[in-house]
Structures are given as C-alpha cells and as structure tokens.
Image: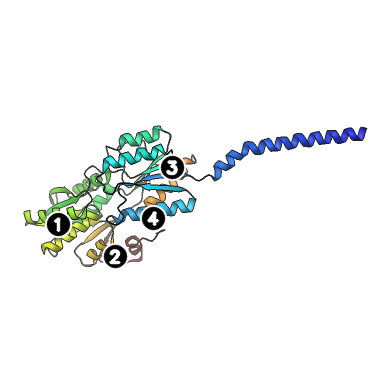
Amino acid sequence: MKRQGQIISLLAVVTVAATVILITFVNQKPARRAAVETINIEVILKSTDYTSIPFWDVVRQGLETAAEDIQAHISISGPKSETEIDLQIQLVYEAMAREPDAIILAAADYKRLISAAEDIISSGIPLITIDSFVDSDSPVSRIGTDNYSAGLKAGHIMKEYISKGSQIAIISYVKESSTALDREKGVRESLQGYADIIGTWYSGGNAKIASEQAVSVLKSNPDLAAIIALNEPSTVGSARALELSGRKSEIVLIGFDNSSPIIQYLEQEIIQAIIVQKPFNMGYLGVTYAADAVSGKKVPEVIDTGAEIITKETMYTSENQKLLFPVNRN
C-alpha cells in the first residue's frame, strides 16, 4: 500500500508538471505566432506610372526586394500622375482602413498631406516617408535624397558651363512637392549673384508638357543660355525641346535622374550633366525601417540616400555605371 501511495503521489506530481508545461506552452503560443507573423506594409507612391517615370519603377524594385528579404507583405498603390494629390490622399485613408502594421508614403504635396500623415500616426500606425516628405514631425523616418544639397550640386555644375550673367530657365514638376521646393531652393542659392534665373515652369511631371514649356521658353528668350530640369520627365522633355529647336549645341542642359532616354541624351551631349539619385535604396530602406518600427526598434529620423553628379566624361566609371544602370541591390 505504501508503494502504491508513492506511485499515486508521483503521478500527481507528473500531472501537475505536465499541466504547468501545457499552460506555459499555451501562453507562449501567441507570442511565438506573433514573432513569425508576416508584417503587412501599405505603400502609397506619388506615381505608379512606371513606364513614363522609371524612377518609381526602381523605387518599386527596392521595396519588393526588401519585402522578399525580410518576408514582409507589401501592397503598393498610387495615382498615375504626380499631380493627382486628392487621389493620393484618398489612397492613404483607404490604406489606413486596412489596418496595416506600417505605412510608407511618398507625399505628392508638402502641405496637403499633413493631415493624412498625422492621422496615420494618431491611429497607431508607424509612418515612414520616402523621397518626398510632409511638413510635419509625425513620420517616424524620412528617407531620401537631400534635395536642397542636390539642387546646390546642379547649380554648381552649371557654373562650369556658363559665363556670369547668363540667362537660365528652371523646368520643374509639381509645385508644392517637397523635392521640387528643395531642389529649386538649392539651385537658386547656388546661382545667386552669378546667373539670371528668368523663371520656373511646372510640368506636372509630364515630359510632353515639359517639352512644350521648354520650346516656348526658347522662342521667347533668344538670349537663354541654359536650362536646369528638376526631375526625369522635365529633363527628357527639355532635351526633346532642344532637339526640336535646333539649338542643342547652344543651350546647356543640366537634369535629374537616369532613365534610358536621359543616358542617351547625356552620351549625345544634349545634356551636359545629371544629378543621379538612389531610388532603389529609398525603397529598400523604407521597408527595412518600417519593419524595425513595427518591432519597436529605434529608427533614424532622417536618412540621406545620396545623389551624384554624372557627366559624359564620368559616366563610364564602374561606380557611376552602377548608378546609371541599377540592378536590384546596387
């Protein structure tokens, strides 16, 4: 009987231990599930017209590569045109309604997206901004080119091609985009007291409109010496205008970005220099830091992804070839 009592006691101890282990397992199971659960990230770009604006296609490649690397799920949306600001705001609120773990935004308007950005944060969703920002402290991080510095670079390289007092036109894109504002500010400050900037024209990020504007500027200003174009469509449009006008050998053109047409115009010396950004890095870091923010890690408030001046003389270096022809992880 004594031995039987010992066995019963031992079984009771084992049962209690097993119960404790089971309870512990059940309590830990949600935590384990959460640790491996896929992070859902909503991305709202300024434009999803990847054909007309290849810059955004490279951003998309960066987003998708990072998502694959960290096994996150991303959903990318955005208007076709960068001028469709109301639609972008609508898309932001639609993304919020799906209750993602984080939102990545390239804001089409520096001011008009403020409320949407602040509503994202108020809802408890981390917000990462890439490329184009909002006039608010709400975003967890701002990742992109230091566009003021890029504008300074454009003005600086322009001085190597023109004489003091020369007339210059600026062909920009969306008037209230943070990138356009900062680039123009940098250009104007760099050339202050050196060149005569006769005005700024806004193409809405449309190469056809940019071309028409540049043609008109050339006809109205026979003494024009140069054009600075502030994004990819504006650069392509301005280069086409120089071809049409027959003044491609007379007018200096400094542009931004690195689509195939831009590279060809650079080789043909219709464009003298370009400021090349790193859009793949913007997309990749956007997803990486969104995931960090979701997991509670500290995320840098500002990340400058950099921009480089490239001319025909420097375009064939190995480093610049990587920038001109980005393939995924470059």
Q: Which residue is mark 3?
A: 299
Q: Nearer the viewer, residue 268 or 234?
A: 234
* Crowd tier of the residue under label 3, counting other residues whose Cα lies within 10 Å: few below 14, some 14–19, many 20 or above: some
- The structure residue drawn at horizontal position 13% and vertical position 62%, both measured from the top left corner, is 244
Q: Which residue is mark 2?
A: 315
Which is nearer the N-term, disc 2 or disc 3? 3
Mark 2 residue type: Met
Q: Which residue is mark 4?
A: 61
Give the structural element (helix, strand or loop) at label 2: loop
Q: In the image, is 233 to the left or to the right of 117?
A: left
Mark 3 residue type: Val
Q: For the residues marked 4 and 2, what is the alpha-carbon distance in whole angstroms? A: 23 Å
Mark 1 residue type: Ala
Which is nearer the N-term, disc 4 or disc 2? 4
Q: Is residue 109 visible?
A: no
Give the structural element (helix, strand or loop) at label 3: loop
Q: Nearer the viewer, mark 4 or mark 2?
A: 4
Which is nearer the N-term, disc 2 or disc 1? 1
Q: Which residue is mark 1?
A: 226
Q: Is residue 245 visible?
A: yes
Image location (x, y in percent) of residue 147: 28, 48
Q: For the residues marked 4 and 3, what is the alpha-carbon distance in whole angstroms? A: 22 Å
Q: In the image, is 215 to the left or to the right of 16?
A: left
Q: For the residues marked 1 and 3, what is the alpha-carbon distance in whole angstroms? A: 41 Å
